Amino acid sequence: MVGRRPRAVNWPSQIHKTHPTFPRRRRAKPHGHKYRDDDQEAAVSSAQGSGHAPAAIPSDDFKDAAALLAAERRRADLKCKVLDGMRELDLVELDRTLRKSDAELSSIHNKKVRRFYQRQNETLDAWLEVDALVFAVADDVIDSMNPDADRDGIAERRVPLQDSLGAVDAFLPPEHLEKRAREAKHARWAINVNVVANVLLLIGKLISLRFSPSLSLAASTADSALDLFCTLIVYGTNRVVAWRLRALQMKYPVGRRRLEPIGILVFSVIMVVSFLQILQKSVYKLLPWGDHEVAALPPVAIGAMAANAVIKGLIGLACRHVKTTQVQALVQDCKTDVYFNIVSLLFPLIGVTANVWWLDPAGASLLAVFVIVDWAETCIRNVSRLTGSNVGYALQKKLMYLAFRFSPVVEGFKALTAYHAGDGVWVELDILLDEATPLPTAHDIAETLQYCYEGLQEVDRAFVTVDYSTLGPTGHSVAYLV
């Protein structure tokens, strides 16, 4: 067939640990087969290209043969236009010409120019990912369209999307699957290491708190306790999202990915409220009627806070390249811990050395304000995403480029809207087709685009609608303002 390539995954058992299912036989075909295999399918295509009728179709079933050939011709034509049209733009050669290496980037002293070329490299990476996705997914999705062209209730061909149980990931190239598996493994590693580190550091600080009444040490201990709570929230939501129980899938038909930002939002509120109390105690101690005694800082407390800063710094550096929401939240927390423990160590240590009583509560107050502001921003950012904020400019360009790759089969694009639904993104695309376009062709184009969008890691859901005019309704109702 036109555009046929060796499939990276032939059966869903390799991805989903299940066995492929086929449509149940409703009535027997004249020769008793359920579907044509790939060799018979190729024979039909070659026969229609040579002008001869395929030998596999009996002469007494002319109407069925005509329907099969029409469907086959439509699929082959659509794949030819999409895939051959993509080959007209040699993105690999463009990448070779425009990409700047790390050495070339480091030799650019102007920060604005260097940042421009870094963004250009990121754009090329996004476009290469889109091209690999469309080449891998489009032909299998198009092959899945209308497997029962003669409408007898029996699929004449294998249906790739049915074989993969609707999972587009099964059609991705092996290198993309390996990359995603590697990122998931790194995320699990980061969370597990952070849990162990938080437990050990919290035990050390609790022991130190018994020997020192320092408010800075108390703030640092509270921060470690809440760190552990944050890690447990992230770990718990990550496990719940991964559950594939049938009851949960029916209750949450589009998945439970929004549990992750909700968990971070809950932790942000707890963090802000807790440090407001620490700020209150620190300010009270700075008042004239407060306790002005210099807080002692034993060596065990100094060692605990120094170890916390070093260990959290190492974990943050190791995890900063894992671009998932939960791991990035832990990286932000590690960065906060490093600053927090360095300052919480310096203020009481200088106060004890110089015998200045107010340095300890002043340091605790500054740390509390820093944590409150930092996590309030995190809270606002997650609320914004949960309430449907628009995506960034870089992702908008990536989504538009994917639509552009289907330009050989569409007349134009009327609207592209992309917005957050939690961490994931929902995409709405309105394409323009000629009003004489047959319904099967319009359906196949729109649904292929939809599956390609949902093959992107950032996208949870995509909705592609078809229009024949640039003017007219926008497609959605809006609130009527009196």
Image (spheres, rainbow, N blue to C red):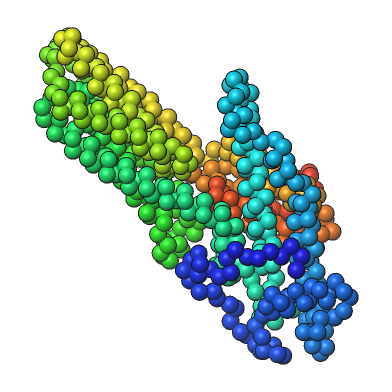
Residue 273 % position (x, y): 29, 31
Quarter of the figure with the N terminus: bottom right
Looking at the image, residue 417 sits to the left or right of residue 340; the answer is right
From this viewpoint, is residue 282 visible?
Answer: yes
Viewer-proximal residue among 13 and 237: 13
The quadrant in which residue 370 appears is top left
Could you say which is closer to the camera, residue 179 or residue 36? 179
Q: Give how far across and how far down residue 71 sits, in percent.
A: 77, 71
Q: Residue furthest right?
A: 51
**Residue 257 placement, left or right of 91:** left
Asked if residue 429 is positioned above or below residue 320 in the image, the reply reads below
Image location (x, y in percent) of residue 40: 73, 79
Q: Give the residue drawn at x 49%, y 39%.
A: 385
Which picture quadrant has residue 418?
Answer: top right
Q: Looking at the image, which residue is at 35% across and 45% down? A: 191
Q: Which residue occupies 32% across, 34% down?
A: 312
Evaluate whether residue 473 shows in this view: no
